[in-house]
Amino acid sequence: MMFNIGFYLVVPFLAVYMTQSLAAGGAMIGLVLGLRTFSQQGLFFLGGGLTDRFGVKPVLLVGIAIRVIGFIVTGLSRSTVDLMIGVILIGVAAALFSPAAEAALADSGREAEESGRATRAEIFALDSMFSRAGALIGPILGAVLMSVDFALTCWVAAAIFTGLFLSHLLVIPAVRIESSTPVLTGWATVLRNRAFLVFAVAYSTYLVAYNQQYLSLPVELTRAVGHQDALGWMFVYSSVLILCLQMPVTATFQFMATSRVLGIGFGVTAAGFLVLAVSAPLNPLPGIWAYAPAIGMLTLLHLGQMIAIPVARDLVGVFAGERNLGAYFGFLNSFGGLAVLLSSLLLGMLIDAADTAQPAAALPWGLLAGMSAASAVALMVIARRIRA
């Protein structure tokens, strides 16, 4: 939760700062934000390999320290070059500590499951719930601090991560996973696991769907009501939805076969985009009902992910044989980052047609629905084989 509060204090407001204080154009803003995403998602495999080689705690601490430096550089930035350096450091930091944290959760979840305290899927569900709480609190606090000064938001974020560094160094016990695996050996182990590679490609549509909501919602609101004034409230709604339903949903599906849970979850996500594919070519509904397709999409998207993602993350440990967890989680997220990049290029060519009611408006949402539906089928097949 604290990791996300610190992150969302600053990152959602980078574009505002670049526009208002650095006079940056749209192309430069896109470049800077793209560099942050690539330096994070694209390098997850590196952080995962280092976790297997040196252990969770050292990699976590180095990653957190780099993020502190990144926020300080960002707060001091007076040019786009300075800001670019800061956001790259912010992204590289996550590429280190995120795979380490996921590997620690997977290993701790296995121990909790063996002792009968909780299932590993429940541990990952808790992680999702608290992460979303941070993603809700961070932008609200950031908006308050931005009214004073952008640099202040960066100092507060740096202070939060300094506290996280000290807590991991002095308070939080070290999680011991199977380590000392050479980095290249760990990568080779992952790349030889063909079943996992199929799983990672199919799973990557989760990150595509999650990221595309930030593109789809503004476009759909423009089509439906002619403006985006309700955008912030839509994201608040999705956060509250996860906070309220994540644990009950996980408990409901925990006794169901893994393959069925994954199929249902990704199928429900596909249904969310199908709602937009059906409604986008039509004239908007009257009054408040115009918001119904957007709310329906958000509800089904997040419900599907609440069903499937904790179980999918649990399955990574099974693919890994509970070894080289850092490398497996690192590659899983790097595959997702590449899929987000490629899908954004494709959807970017189709999305302009979706802000007005016309037949072509269904294309981007139909594509996203088809990707999620194909993943549902693929994940069901691969899960049956791995759990057999």
Image (cartoon, grey):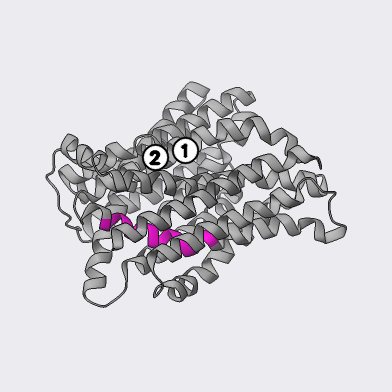
Residue 4, numbered circle: none
Quadrant where the image shows the N terminus: bottom left
| Direction from residue 314 to residue 302 in the image, left or right | right
Looking at the rendering, which quadrant does residue 190 occupy?
A: top left
Quadrant where the image shows the C terminus: bottom left
Q: Are marks 1 and 2 in contact (CB under 8 Å)?
A: yes
The structure residue drawn at horizontal position 54% and vertical position 36%, both measured from the top left corner, is 343
SS for callout 1: helix
The spot of residue 75 in percent (x, y) is 47, 35
Q: Disc 1 residue type? A: Ala
Range of magenta residues:
304-318
Q: Count residues near mark 2 (Cα–Cα under 10 Å), then give few for <14, some for 14-19, many for 20+.
A: many
Considering the whole magenta stretch, tell me its main secondary structure: helix
Q: Is residue 307 magenta?
A: yes
Residue lying at the far left of the rendered structure? 180
Q: Give how far apart the Cα atoms at labels 1 and 2 are.
A: 6 Å
Residue topped by disc 2: 335
Residue lying at the far right of the rendered structure? 286
Looking at the rendering, which quadrant does residue 14 occupy?
A: top right
The structure residue drawn at horizontal position 40% and vertical position 37%, both measured from the top left corner, is 40
Residue topped by disc 1: 339
Q: Count residues near mark 1 (Cα–Cα under 10 Å), then give few for <14, some for 14-19, many for 20+.
A: many
Q: Is residue 64 visible?
A: no
Q: Disc 2 residue type? A: Phe
Q: 186 and 202: which one is in front?
A: 202
| Direction from residue 335 to residue 268 in the image, left or right | right
